[in-house]
Amino acid sequence: MYDATMAETISIAGHGGDQIEAYYARPLGPGPFGGVVVIHHMPGYDPETREIARRFGVRGYNAICPNLYSREAPGASPDDAAAAARARGGVPDERLIGDVAGAVTFLRSQPNSNGKAAAIGYCSGGRQSFLAACSLPLDAAVDCYGAFVVGTPPEGHPLKVGPIVQLTKDLSCPLLGLFGAEDSHPSPQQVHELEQELKAQGKTYEFHTYEGAGHAFFAVNRPSYRVEAANDGWNRIWDFFGRYLAA
């Protein structure tokens, strides 16, 4: 089997038709392949997130990571761009939906696409993955410890967002949620509240909570990394996307 991949920085049409930077990784075989929008965490469009996009490419998915901070600090380092975005309270929900919609349109337009597309996000990106799945027609979505789907940021928190659990009724696809039992944002109680709403709305979902893991347990370059939780989480992601994004 031919298993080469390619990854590169491109430009796509985002919210309002704005041209934004994005990182695109894909297999070079004929396909057809499912598509994955990788939504970066609050620290931004950094090398670690682009590595996640490449990981999806190796596993047989077309993956694109839009730079959600393209407008705040074009050409800046990930740290500077993230600081600029935090100073403005984060990415507005409406703009996020438009940027993800543009990424989905790009993925589905590729000649090797099977027409299916999913979103996955980490930290603030987990919330945004859920938001996208409640706002756009997707085939699957993964929420990795997305903060403030339930509840609001504490005083002094840089994100200025509100809860979106009320959008659960509009969830367009199956949802996989991966959480840490030692996390505060979201807390186990907030995860439970979201789960109860998913049940009430009759949605298809899977939630897994890892003991001994807190926030950002997937982040291999941070002290929060928990290898067993991360490895199990990746296996669940591969299984989930294999069911809902396969050709």
Image: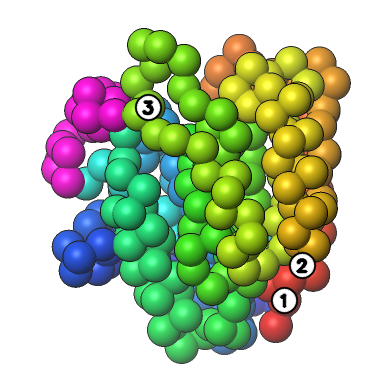
Q: Amino acid at mark 3?
A: Leu
User: Any magenta on residue 72?
Assistant: yes
Q: Amino acid at mark 2?
A: Gly
- According to the image, label 2 marks what residue? 242
**Would you say the residues marked 2 and 1 are in contact, meaning their CB atoms lie under 8 Å apart?**
yes
- According to the image, label 3 marks what residue? 159
Q: Amino acid at mark 1?
A: Ala
Residue at image position (51%, 37%) is 163
- According to the image, label 1 marks what residue? 246
Q: Nearer the viewer, mark 1 or mark 3?
A: 3
**Residue 221 visible somewhere in the drawing:** yes
CA separation in Å, label 1 and label 3: 35 Å
- Residue range highlighted in magenta: 71-89
234 over 187 or under it: above or below: below
Is the residue marked by circle 1 packed among few (<14), some (14-19), or many (20+) residues within 10 Å? some
* 18 or 64: nearer the viewer: 18
110 over 78 or under it: above or below: below
Is the residue marked by circle 3 packed among few (<14), some (14-19), or many (20+) residues within 10 Å? many
Give how far across and how far down residue 41 sits, in percent: 46, 36
CA separation in Å, label 2 and label 3: 33 Å
- In the rendered view, does 70 fall on the left or right side of 202? left
20 over 114 or under it: above or below: above
- On-image quarter of the N terminus: bottom right
Q: Secondary structure at mark 1?
A: loop
Q: Secondary structure at mark 2?
A: helix
